[in-house]
Amino acid sequence: MKKNFKYYGNSFLARITLMVMLGIGLIAVTVSVVVLVMSRNAFTETYGTSQEKVFEQIEKELNDFHGNLQDVISAIDSSWAFRLYLNGDDELDNVMTFQNIYQMEKDLEQSKSSDMERLNILVLGTGGKHYLSRTETISASDEEIMDSEAVKTALMEPEIMHYTFSHGAYTATAKDADVVIVSKALYFQESREVYAVVLVTLTMDDMRKYYDYFISDYTSLYLVGKDDRVICSDNKGLIGSVMEEPWYGQAQKTEQTRFVTKNGGKNLTIMKRELTYLGCSLYGVVDNNLALENLYDMPLLIVICAFIGVLILVICLIFTRQTTKPLSKLVFKMSMIREGNFNEYMPVEGTIEVKELAATYNYMLDDIRNYIAELLETQKEQRKSEIKALQMQINPHYIYNTLASIKWLVYQNNSEKTIQMIDAFISLLRNTISNADEFITISQEIENLQNYILINHTRYGEAVKVEFYVSQSCHDCLIPKLILQPFIENAFFHAFPSGRGGSIQILMKQRGEDLEIRIIDDGIGMNQSKAEQVVKQETKKEHFSGIGIHNVQDRLRLLYGGNYGIRIESVEQEGTTVVVTLPVRRRTEDKNEGNE
């Protein structure tokens, strides 16, 4: 699958498709970026101007509220009823006290505008008397109220009104709520002596009605005091805290009333106004990115661009496919050659270039078929020659020594051993020289090995024991002739020198589709680097034959490919293991595949 993907990814059609896709994508991205940048710039300016008008309206309403509140406080300050109540003695009778309070409420109601009916106004006298405009329980003592930040600020600057944030006020309903307290000290003009403090409590809902129409998912408003503390905002998490936003620092440094800045990856429009009468600053923040997303349906724009791109791509692919189809067909037929199919001729049709390629391909195919036929015939003759050469590679000295051993047995009158050795030697020569088959069964190979072992035991003694462990399913498996005998021979004469005893084990079993043969000895062994060199180099020709391990490795690679062959594992003074791996082939398969 990975190979096919790599092939198609590097094809002519794929490259054209890729170029078209890149072109369409580049155009779509470029147009989208240009449109978005131009839209963002135009939107930032236009939307910023429109929001600035709304912002100015909020400024006007807050100033109007401040003016109305100032009228209320001035009315309290100029009311004889309030002065009499706060500064008079306590000897007034009940009737006069009732009349005085009635006049105070009348003066207060006449001074309040319609939007101030629900305000909580507390007038706290320095002499210990106080007046609350609403029927409500005061939850704090006069001393605690006089010690509050709002009162202290008013006493420090009695000439002006102060807006202060407070978490909790002096009444039961506002005890644990975030509120804005407007404070103003009342004093005698002649002596400048403060005789009372007016405290107006505004809840966050009271303040929100002045800027609620400005607030949205992408706009926010902040009312900040002189100490940089947020007095009121739609962002509840910042109320009462010191403003530390980066855009706030920029707003402090610039004289512009509206500017655009980046803050935390966001494109923001900042508007500010100094509310001189309130002693505060008003800030409006617009997130241009969110506003632009609401203005433009980006998913729809992406879908439209994608649809147009796919449509153009399909048209280009149809045209390209018709043009490259003959080339693709030629490539497919050429790929069939790697699978051994040399009969896929290409019809000479299409454009001039394709016709020339097809004719050349057909001519090349004829040459390849002729060359392969000649090569197969040559390899066939070469294989026959190799088999004949192997059959003639029995060492003459081995024959002389074996006959001498037989002669010695005859001289000893050991007729039984003599007959066994002669039978073994005859069988070994017959299967080695007379049998012209290139492949023999495991059973035949075991018989040859047993005859070879019998002769060696007769000649050199039985110090080296040989054991066979063959799986029942392996007996009819076919293996090349004379591939195991060199390893047995090496084990006899190199693993056990100077008459040293030991054992050789021959194990054969099937592993999936492979036949695994292990020849294990407990001889003197060798280091691993030398074991690897044994497979790569020719060994000295002696004993039974001159067939070296290197020749066996070459034969197996020639017959079965590079995945099969010999592996030697050895440890000095512990022994050697030879692993021969072959594909499983049986007699019936050999007959069916003979012609192939």
Image: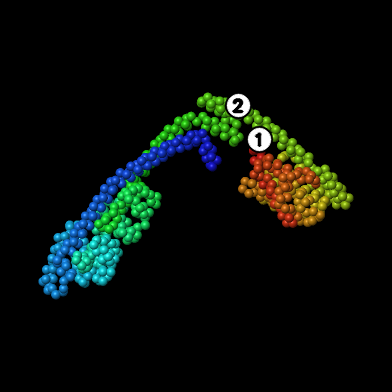
Could you tell me residue 548's position as x and y percent?
A: 75, 44
Q: Are marks 2 and 1 in contact (CB under 8 Å)?
A: no
Please identify the quadrant where the C terminus is shown. Answer: top right
Near mark 1 (Cα within 10 A), the count class, few <14, some 14-19 or many ≥20, is few
What amino acid type should be assigned to the residue bearing mark 1? Asn
What amino acid type should be assigned to the residue bearing mark 2? Tyr
**Position of residue 374 in the picture relative to residue 30 (left or right):** right
Does dot 2 land on a helix, a strand or a loop? helix
Could you tell me residue 3's position as x and y percent?
A: 55, 40
Does dot 1 land on a helix, a strand or a loop? loop
From what the image shows, is residue 134 above or below residue 352? below
Decide if residue 93 is in sight here. Answer: yes
Q: Which mark is residue 363?
A: 2
Q: Where on the picture, by quarter, is residue 554?
A: top right
Which-is-in-front pick, marks 2 and 1?
Answer: 2
From what the image shows, is residue 301 above or below residue 181? above
**Which residue appears at 74% of the width and 54% of the height?**
525
**Which residue appears at 36% of the width and 41% of the height?**
38
Q: Residue furthest left?
A: 95
Q: Residue furthest front?
A: 190
Q: Where on the picture, by quarter, is residue 157?
A: bottom left
Could you tell me residue 535's position as x and y percent?
A: 72, 46
